[in-house]
Amino acid sequence: MDRRTFMSSSAMTAAALFLKWRGAAAHAAKGAPGPIVETTAGKIRGLVVDRVHAFKGVPYGASTSGTRRFLPPANVQPWTGVRDTMAIGPRSPLVDSVLVPEWTSLNLREPMGEDCLNLNLWTPSAAKGGRRPVMVWLHGGGYSTGSPNMSPYDGANLARKHDVVVVGLTHRLNVFGFAYLAELGGERFADASNAGMKDIILGLEWIRDNIAGFGGDPNSVTIFGQSGGAGKVSTLLGMPAAQGLFHRAIAQSGSAVTSLPAGAATESAAAFMSRLGLKGNQVEELQALPMPQLLEALAPRAGPSTGRGRGAPVSGQAAVAGRGRGPGGGGFNAAPVVDGKSLPHNVFDPSATTISQSVPLLIGSTETEVTWNVNTDYTPPADDAALRERVKRALRIADDGRADQIVATYRRGRPKATPLDLALIIETDASPFRSGTDTEAERKAALGKAPVYMYRFQWYSPVGGGRLRAMHCMDIPFVFANVDASTPVVGAGADRYALADRMSAAWAAFARTGNPNTKLLPKWEPFTAEKRSTMIFNTDCRAVNDPYREERLAVASAQAPRRSN
């Protein structure tokens, strides 16, 4: 697609999506006007819907366009009068990419723009004096796509059922939020690093300064996120400017054991600029380009297929959190950068950071993370030889005998699993989704300063004949108690409600005390590298020490030579 076609197509698509979004926003805005709340920037008024006060599109930072593009965020300009905050605000500029079809209807695809530093807030009572825990959601999509406005992310049910305040933050993504220009742009761009993460920190500062007016406790803030959002949570644990702004952390299906080295980030930024015909020292020219031109350069180029089973991250909802290209990245490596200042070191390598050592962590993954991708290979292996080949590809090994031993280990532990189930679980266990969360849990627990709680989500969705299984993102509707709003993904079975009650209650309990135990679950012990206590979430929830130990050790042994390089 040439530039003119892309720009014309983008404009028409944006117009159509805006009309669709405007209708959806009008529908979502039903409710009664709520009380006026005073913030540090001015007065706002939201809506009361089914006993929950909702404030949407609340600005927490100034526009990041023009001379503020790529630079640290600035405080929002104060206003006079009362500002209505009853509809979601713009998302960050991004390139929408192919979703797993079942998730498509759950993505509002709201308009995008560089004036995107806004938040959504749900509270049972918009009045001072409350001491409710605050849960701050960081959305997935790697560091390239996504927004806090997917239907499963709505915080009303979580706030209503568990008496908490829920906040969803919008922040800059892809090149707008993660272009590392400190080594290319001279003194003016010396702080052009990790802008998207700095946006989140500014949002947390807004919460610190304002949340008491919404019944929340600024001294009881939990950051939680999934996939790329879990990577953001993990990164914040190692950012000095974020310390004291949150007190507990939850990472779902994502990690940030290591982040991008400054040298690699500089190369990525220079390569992106070259696609726009700019040299590395022309950062001011990059800052002045129209937003659609940058999005055009981010759009993925046509290329060969990545193959079966372990395709490139193409879902706008999910991406491997951590290093590497996110969906819609067009080759730009969007990730937090170890710049020596805002992020001094890798957060969990070679050991866990000590600057957040007193922050409890809840972390885990789903059984078949890899089924999030439209390139997932759902073809049942025809025979043992076909299954062996999939295992060899997943583990990057050439030894037939070793692959057969690993399959035999999994079959012993899962006698009812089909060959396709075995393939998908092994592929998940070989992925960063599992190894990253395991590594973070191990290294955080080794500090011995705050508890770590590990979980595994094993509930299989019935949608599409069970094709999605316990896919990446499948736990989100249960955490938010939004299973009825997520039927395209979780179906309509009655068993959804009990699991949603258990998971949302555990997450809220952790936000309240740093301990996820509730009367709805068996005793959930903290994780240690020795016992590896894990809560299994399924129709029947159970607490297990070191579940699937033999499988874990077999995969680790097969991957050891590669990991040591």
Image (cartoon, rainbow, N blue to C red):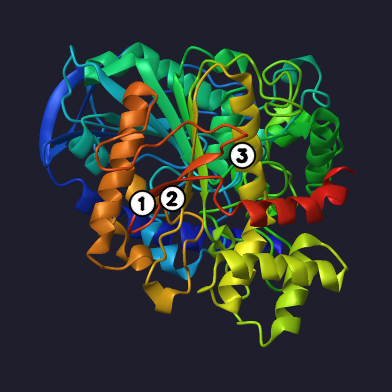
The image's mark for residue 541 is 1
Q: Quadrant of residue 160?
A: top left
Number of the front mark, 3 or 1: 1
Q: What residue sits right under mark 3 in the picture?
A: 255
Q: Earlier in the sequence, mark 3 or mark 1?
A: 3
Mark 3 and mark 1 in contact? Answer it, CB < 8 Å.
no
- The residue closer to the viewer here, 5 or 431, is 431
Observer able to see residue 427:
yes
Give the Cα distance between marks 2 and 1: 5 Å
- Say left or right for 169 vs 503: right
- The residue closer to the viewer here, 432 or 130, is 432
Q: What residue sits right under mark 2 in the picture?
A: 536
Kind of residue at disc 2: Ile
Q: Residue at x 66, y 88 (%)?
A: 382
x and y percent of residue 78 in the render?
A: 36, 15
Q: Residue furthest bottom?
A: 382
